[in-house]
Structure formats: structure tokens, C-alpha cells
Amino acid sequence: MTLSKRQFGRGFQAAGAACAGCAILYLLTDTLAVRLAQAVLRRWLAGAGAGALAALYERCTWLATMLSELAALALPVLAAMGLFLLSPAEMGLRRPRKALLGPAICLYLGGSELLNLLAGVVGEKTGSTQSIVLPESAGALCIAFLSVCVVPAIGEELLFRGAACALLRPYGAWLAIWGQAILFALLHQKISAIVFALPSGLFFGYLAENTGSLAPGMALHFVNNCQAFGMLYFSRMGLGALSGALGAVGLIVLPALAVGTALWLAARRDKRFSALPAGASPLRLLRCAPWVLAAAFLLADSVLKL
């Protein structure tokens, strides 16, 4: 059987369906787990009455949120690994082939500042801004840090740049990158968040394919989440002016750092950011009905939330 027949035959349809299934399973598990946790917590609070400690309830709420997210991320990853026998190496669970974390951080931080600005403008225009209210107690704040910064950085990379990319990789590196990135972005649901998540998903996917490892993407994902968490924390502490000042400085310094890094890499003719192997065009995803249906469903869900 020739490669082209494999690309556009049943194997490709199955891979696209599995990739779409991972995204939908994640959404359904997260929704059900969160609703179940909320129902249990409401019932516990009603039973405890006035004697319930606010700090304890806050910790339990954030713990339930984190556990729901863990379950939603772990289930599709384990299902994909079990059903398609994905190895740790195929999932990107190994050391990077190339040392490009330093330049990647510089490039991503500069780009993410500009994306944050664009996402903010889009959010104001569409009314789709997304904000998290951080807890008051120290214990709940620690759990919130794990839930907001650590769990997504590890779990989302395993699911999208790990499992989803591994499923689509035989049909082309760029097809795999775009296939997972679009679903990853649409799962953020808010239009402003999608504007930020799509380029991020593409960059993380490129790093995973270029280095053969999830480590660079996990590191950048963690840095980005910590940056957002820090800004929220400053605002909650009444340091909104400091947060704004840091954001203004970052909007100048970080893009300049990214441009400087790009020029430095070009001057050195650095080969670490190399071209990926040729394969099927990402447009071939439009021929995979299950993937298209999943993307359309997630897009409609995002539009309805405007």
C-alpha cells in the first residue's frame, strides 16, 4: 500500500477521529466532573450550615476544580495510549533532541505579550473576556496555583502535543500540529482566549515536533500560566498599578527581546529552528469528517458563549 493511500484512507480517518475524540472526551469529562463537584459542594455547604468555615469551603472548591481537570486530561490521554499503543517516545516523553529552550522562551514571551494585547482588544469588542477570581486563604491559593499553572502545563501538553500529535504524525508533521492546535484553541471557548491559544498551540506543537519532546512546550506553557497568575495575584492584592506598570514595561521589553533573539538566530544561521519533514497538507483535515464535526461543534459552542 502506498503512502498516499495510507494518508487518505481509513488510517487517516481513524487518526482524525481519535484526535477529535480526545478533544470531545476531555470537554465532556471536564463538564461532568465540574458539575458533579459543584453539586457535592453545594450539598455539603447546605448541610454544614452557618458553621461551615469559609476557608475550608474555598480550599475544597479549588481542590475539586483541580481534580476535575486532572480527570478530564488523564482520561483521553490514557485512552489514546491504550487503544493505539502509543509509546512514551511517540508521546514526546523523552529528552529534547535540540537545546532550544532559551531562544524559544525569548521568542514566545515577546509574541505572547502582543497576543495578550490582541486578545484583550478582541475580548472587549466581543464581551468574551475570561477572568479567574483567586482565593483569599493561603491553602486555597496554593491549590489554585497548581490548578492554574501546573496541571494545564503538564496535562494539556500530554493531551494535545503528546497524544493528539502522535495520532496524526504519520500523515505529516504540520498536519499534526494544526490538527491539535485548532482543537486546543477551540476548547478554550472564549473568543479572546482562542485568539491567544491558537498561535500558542501551533508554537508548542512545532517545538514538540522539532525536538521530539514535550519538555520545551511544558516549560513555556508553565511560564505563560505563571505570568497570568502573577498578574491576577497583584490585582487581588490591590497592586493593580504595579501589575499595569509591569505589563506596560513587558509590552516594550519582551517583544524587543524576541526581535533581538530572532535577529541573533538569523545572523548565526542557527539550525535549531529547522524545517519539519514534508507530509500531507493541513488542509487535508477538512477531508476527515469526525475531525471537522468536532471542530464545528467546538466553534459553535464558542460562538454561543458570546
Image: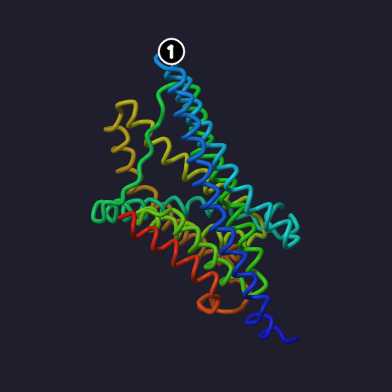
* Residue type of the residue flagged with mark 1: Gly
Q: Which residue is mark 1?
A: 51
The quarter of the displayed image where residue 6 is located: bottom right
| Furthest-top residue in this view | 51
Residue at the spot 52% in from the left edge and 61% down from the top edge: 265
For the C terminus, give its image quadrant: bottom left
Q: Please tell me whether residue 8 is drawn above or below residue 136 in the rendered image.
A: below
| Number of residues whose C-alpha sits closer than 10 Å to that of mark 1, classed few (under 14), some (14–19) or many (20 or more) | few
* Percent of width and height locating residue 285: 53, 75
- Closest to the observer: 238 or 250? 238
* Percent of width and height locating residue 235: 32, 32
Total marks placed? 1
* Percent of width and height locating residue 136: 40, 23
Residue at the spot 62% in from the left edge and 82% down from the top edge: 8
Residue at the spot 45% in from the left edge and 25% down from the top edge: 58
- Element class at badge 1: helix
Q: Please state if 156 lies on the left or on the right of 86 as rendered.
A: left
Q: Please tell me whether residue 174 is drawn above or below residue 204 in the rendered image.
A: below
- Closest to the observer: 216 or 83? 83
For the N terminus, give its image quadrant: bottom right
